[in-house]
């Protein structure tokens, strides 16, 4: 999805001041969940820090996110003086899904890398099910650097991963945080095979593809009642992903591992949803074409109960945004 052409002009960042105290606390409370735990502000300490300018210092910085003159969230950076800053972003629920988060990340990078020649990285962490924030990181040039397994625990769900992203000075200098002309982002999207347009039907019906994307690099896992495990990896250029794949069949006892190549062409269907035309060829010469349709939402459960025990284990994940 392309960015709104005038969004960068609509968004401004300004320093947090004591007059922002009440709405900062309100936004923090309203956006707190397992996907984005509370930042745990202490009212007297936050008031004193804002009053004395501690959120505009060498080691940390606080920004109000302004959209057309109205505050819609805030972003905090800590550890700036170490050269490896960590960010925390909170955005009002009714302002998400508009591309604000990715534009704010770009503005933050432009300001702090230009202002501090010793700053080498800006990093953030995100819950594995916080797909909108992952997509915001991707769009702003941040790349995944680590996955912390079983890091987020809750009484209501199995342990979850925490994913770490970062934008380096070299990324920024190469303008990797800038829009790339509206290239597609498949990260976090789920597609099902809707129809077999050509070739064998065995193993095709019921296939579900789950995509991850970092820049132009695209991977997906896929499976069905016949395909026990499958994975593809490729490169996105404009609206085409050229890939190589490997898959394993349940039903074949000998020689069940199949490898091959393929091409995904991204298009928009009559219902306005994304579709993928998948042309594949295996290394034994079989070939086919299938139509993949995007699901409306990932069925993975989203846990909203907060787990305060996670707050001090490492820098907190960024808030949901897109």
Image (cartoon, grey):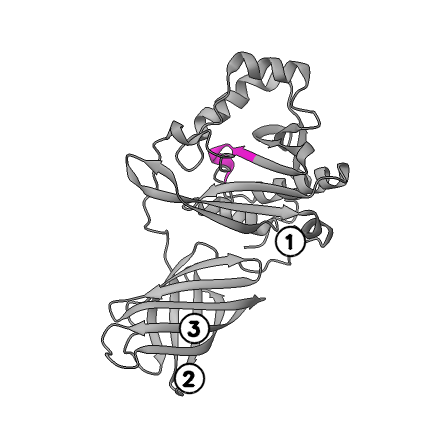
Whole-percent x and y of residue 50? 63, 17
Q: Is residue 62 visible?
A: yes
Q: In which quarter of the image is the N terminus?
A: bottom right
Q: Can residue 185 be seen in this view?
A: no
Up-down: is 284 above or below 110?
below
Up-down: is 203 above or below 143?
below
Within 10 Å of disc 3 (Cα), the crowding (few <14, some 14-19, many 20+) is many
- Horizontal relation, residue 72 to residue 189: left or right: right
Q: Which residue is drawn at 46% across and 29% down?
A: 312
Whole-percent x and y of residue 138? 56, 51
Q: Which of 65 and 124 is in front in this view?
A: 124
Determine which of the numbered discs, if any, sits on residue 179 in the image: 1
| Residue denoted by label 2 | 283
Could you tell me how far apart the alpha carbons at marks 2 and 1 are, in whole angstroms?
37 Å
Q: Nearer the viewer, residue 211 or 150?
A: 150
Determine which of the numbered discs, if any, sits on residue 105 in the image: none
Kindly report which numbered mark, 3 or 1, lies closer to the viewer in this rendering: 3
Between discs 3 and 2, the one toward the N terminus: 3
Residue 93 colored in magenta in the image:
yes
Within 10 Å of disc 1 (Cα), the crowding (few <14, some 14-19, many 20+) is some
Within 10 Å of disc 2 (Cα), the crowding (few <14, some 14-19, many 20+) is few
Between discs 2 and 1, the one toward the N terminus: 1
The stretch in magenta equals 88-96
Up-down: is 159 above or below 21?
below
Count up the numbered dots.
3
Q: Which quadrant holds residue 17? A: top right
| Residue denoted by label 3 | 245
Q: Do the residues labelled 2 and 1 touch (CB within 8 Å)?
A: no
Q: What element carries label 2?
A: loop
């Amino acid at each position: 999805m392309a960015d709104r052409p005038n969004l960068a002009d609509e968004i401004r960042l300004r320093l947090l001041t004591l007059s922002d105290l009440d709405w900062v606390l309100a936004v923090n409370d309203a956006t707190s969940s397992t996907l984005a735990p509370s930042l745990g502000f202490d009212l007297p300490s936050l008031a004193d820090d804002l009053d004395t300018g501690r959120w505009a210092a060498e080691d940390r910085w606080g920004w109000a996110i302004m959209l057309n003159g109205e505050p819609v969230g805030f972003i905090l950076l800590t550890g700036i003086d170490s050269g490896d800053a960590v960010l925390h972003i909170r955005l009002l629920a009714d302002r998400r899904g508009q591309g604000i988060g990715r534009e704010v990340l770009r503005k933050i990078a432009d300001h702090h890398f230009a202002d501090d020649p010793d700053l080498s990285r800006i990093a953030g962490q995100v819950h594995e099910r916080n797909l909108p924030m992952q997509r915001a990181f991707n769009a702003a040039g941040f790349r995944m650097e680590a996955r912390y397994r079983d890091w987020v625990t809750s009484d209501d769900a199995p342990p979850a991963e925490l994913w770490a992203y970062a934008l380096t000075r070299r990324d920024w200098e190469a303008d990797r945080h800038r829009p790339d002309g509206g290239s597609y982002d498949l990260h976090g999207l789920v597609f099902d095979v809707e129809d077999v347009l050509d070739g064998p039907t065995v193993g095709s019906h019921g296939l579900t593809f789950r995509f991850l994307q970092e820049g132009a690099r695209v991977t997906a896992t896929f499976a069905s009642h016949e395909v026990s495990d499958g994975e593809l990896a490729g490169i996105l250029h404009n609206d085409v992903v050229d890939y190589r794949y490997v898959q394993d069949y349940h039903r074949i006892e000998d020689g069940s591992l199949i490898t091959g190549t393929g091409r995904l062409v991204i298009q928009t269907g009559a219902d306005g949803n994304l579709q993928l035309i998948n042309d594949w060829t295996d290394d034994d010469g079989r070939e086919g074409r299938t139509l993949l349709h995007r699901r409306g939402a990932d069925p993975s459960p989203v846990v909203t109960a907060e787990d305060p025990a996670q707050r001090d284990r490492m820098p907190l994940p960024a808030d949901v945004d897109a």
